[in-house]
Image: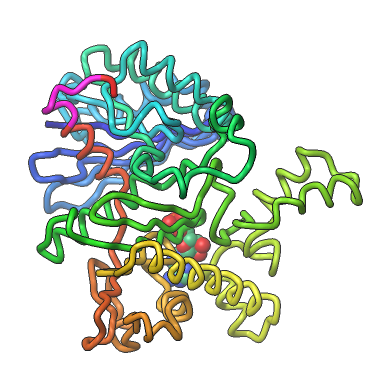
């Protein structure tokens, strides 16, 4: 089964084409700056065992419809294409950011599903409209393919009330669905399943803490295969310190900023989402740069790393308590996969919990799944590269095979 995975943003379409026979990527790329003269369309075909062919086209991509059509032209190109005809693509798997409480699992898209995604727009005002555009456009470009929605929030729908409710008037939840939802669910689910496969144990027997450290960052506590808590909240602003997002702050800070600095809601939103986190503390949001600055003696960069790793450590302790026991702690995404230093600082001093990193294993170069804990420690500490696109393709295939409809 050949599946196209697309992640549609307000001015971009990221895509990967998979052959699910062997879970192989056939092609991938990105249409970006849609609607601008400076549009860019990239395409990379990955032939079995061969050298990838890369293409880059510059110039106006008028809208998402044109973007997807041009992606399809590249996919079926007689010389460099990945498939002979678009009819070979059986399904399109869409990343949808917010499924609210309506979607606890991946689902085949129909009119009711589209209406429910629309209903969740207030919860994800930037992302869900773009995801809906992707669904609409893919429906017209691939009229015969099954359209499937894979939600960032679905994996977290098993979180119990005591962890998803905020202690504010209950009507806010009942009437307006103000609650913790959590995000990066596709990544956390993929990591949990991959860890279970690697450890040779059923997911349902494992207690895991998954730590996704990319530009956005979140952690999940997974008890017997079910997510029981996560750091992001009603929005992706909560929890860990991120590249430009603050993570948890005292909820009264926005009032202080409004009252005393006369900042508007929009400015405060901007401050917390785009000017805070690592960037707010030390001026750089790319962790490589932050580490380099720290090594060069920059005090602010040192403070940024201290706050960043202390927050992770605090949540490890909290989630250990929530789970009661722990089989594995797993790092993933850009920083989690590539920075031994951040992994080491985040776990330093946790040996009483059975968590200790072995410096040699941690620093060893090379990618792939690996164990980095000291051999004698009870808790496995692992690095597992995330692959959200593959997980979306797997989910899409699964739901089609089951012939499952709306949740
Ligand atoms: P992602 O959003 O998963 O692509 O992750 C992006 C983040 O990963 C950025 O902050 C990068 O600086 C960070 N990153 C990538 N490679 C490294 C590395 N070798 N060391 C530290 N951070 C890295």
Classify the position of the N terminus by image quarter.
Answer: top left
Q: Is residue 360 above or below residue 20?
A: below
Image x and y of residue 109, in percent: 31, 19
Q: Kindly identify the residue that appears in the image at 36 percent across and 66 percent down.
A: 331
Q: Kindly identify the residue that appears in the image at 28 percent across and 49 percent down.
A: 226
Q: Is residue 53 left or right of residue 97?
A: left
Range covered by the magenta-colored residues: 399-405
Colour mapping: rainbow
Q: Kindly identify the residue that appears in the image at 78 percent across and 43 percent down.
A: 267
Image x and y of residue 80, in percent: 22, 36
Q: Is residue 58 above or below residue 305?
A: above
Q: Is residue 404 magenta?
A: yes
Total label count?
0
Image x and y of residue 323, in percent: 34, 63
Classify the position of the C terminus by image quarter.
Answer: top left
Q: Is residue 184 above or below residue 35?
A: below
Q: Is residue 6 left or right of residue 22?
A: right
Q: Kindly identify the residue that appears in the image at 81 percent across and 47 percent down.
A: 255
Report the front residue among 18 and 313.
Answer: 313
Q: Is residue 401 magenta?
A: yes
Quadrant for residue 402, please give it.
top left
Q: Is residue 75 visible?
A: yes
Quadrant for residue 299, please give it.
bottom right
Q: Is residue 50 above or below residue 357?
A: above
Q: Is residue 11 visible?
A: no
Image x and y of residue 50, in percent: 15, 52
């Amino acid at each position: 089964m050949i599946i196209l995975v697309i992640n549609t943003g307000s001015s971009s379409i990221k895509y990967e084409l998979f052959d699910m026979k062997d879970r192989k990527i056939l092609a991938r790329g990105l249409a970006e700056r849609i609607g601008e003269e400076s549009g860019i369309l990239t395409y990379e075909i990955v032939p079995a065992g061969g050298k990838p062919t890369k293409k880059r086209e510059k110039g106006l991509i008028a809208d998402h419809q044109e973007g997807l059509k041009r992606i399809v032209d590249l996919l079926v190109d007689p010389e460099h294409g990945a498939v002979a005809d678009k009819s070979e693509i059986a399904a399109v798997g869409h990343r949808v950011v917010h499924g609210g409480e309506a979607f606890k699992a991946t689902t085949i898209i129909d009119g009711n599903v589209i209406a429910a995604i629309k209903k969740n727009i207030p919860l994800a005002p930037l992302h869900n409209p773009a995801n809906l555009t992707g669904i609409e456009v893919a429906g017209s470009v691939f009229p015969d393919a099954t359209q499937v929605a894979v939600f960032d929030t679905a994996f977290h729908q098993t979180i119990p009330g005591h962890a998803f409710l905020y202690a504010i008037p209950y009507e806010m939840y009942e009437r307006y669905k103000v609650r913790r939802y959590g995000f990066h669910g596709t990544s956390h689910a993929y990591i949990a399943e991959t860890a279970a496969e690697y450890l040779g144990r059923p997911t349902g027997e494992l207690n895991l803490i998954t730590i996704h450290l990319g530009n956005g960052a979140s952690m999940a506590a997974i008890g017997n295969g079910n997510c029981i808590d996560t750091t992001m909240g009603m929005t992706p602003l909560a929890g860990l310190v991120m590249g430009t997002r603050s993570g948890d702050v005292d909820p009264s800070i926005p009032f202080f900023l409004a009252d005393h600095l006369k900042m508007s809601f929009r400015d405060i939103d901007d401050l917390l989402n785009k000017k805070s986190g690592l960037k707010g503390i030390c001026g750089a949001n790319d962790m490589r740069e932050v580490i380099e600055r720290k090594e060069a003696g920059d005090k602010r960069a040192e403070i940024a790393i201290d706050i960043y790793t202390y927050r992770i450590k605090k949540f490890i302790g909290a989630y250990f308590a929530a789970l009661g026991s722990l089989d594995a702690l797993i790092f993933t995404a850009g920083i989690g996969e590539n920075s031994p230093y951040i992994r080491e600082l985040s776990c330093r001093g946790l040996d009483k919990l059975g968590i200790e990193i072995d410096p040699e294993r941690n620093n060893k170069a090379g990618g792939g799944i690996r164990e980095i804990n000291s051999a004698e420690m009870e808790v496995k500490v692992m690095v597992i590269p995330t692959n959200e696109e593959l997980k979306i393709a797997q989910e899409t295939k699964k739901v089609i095979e089951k012939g499952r409809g709306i949740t």
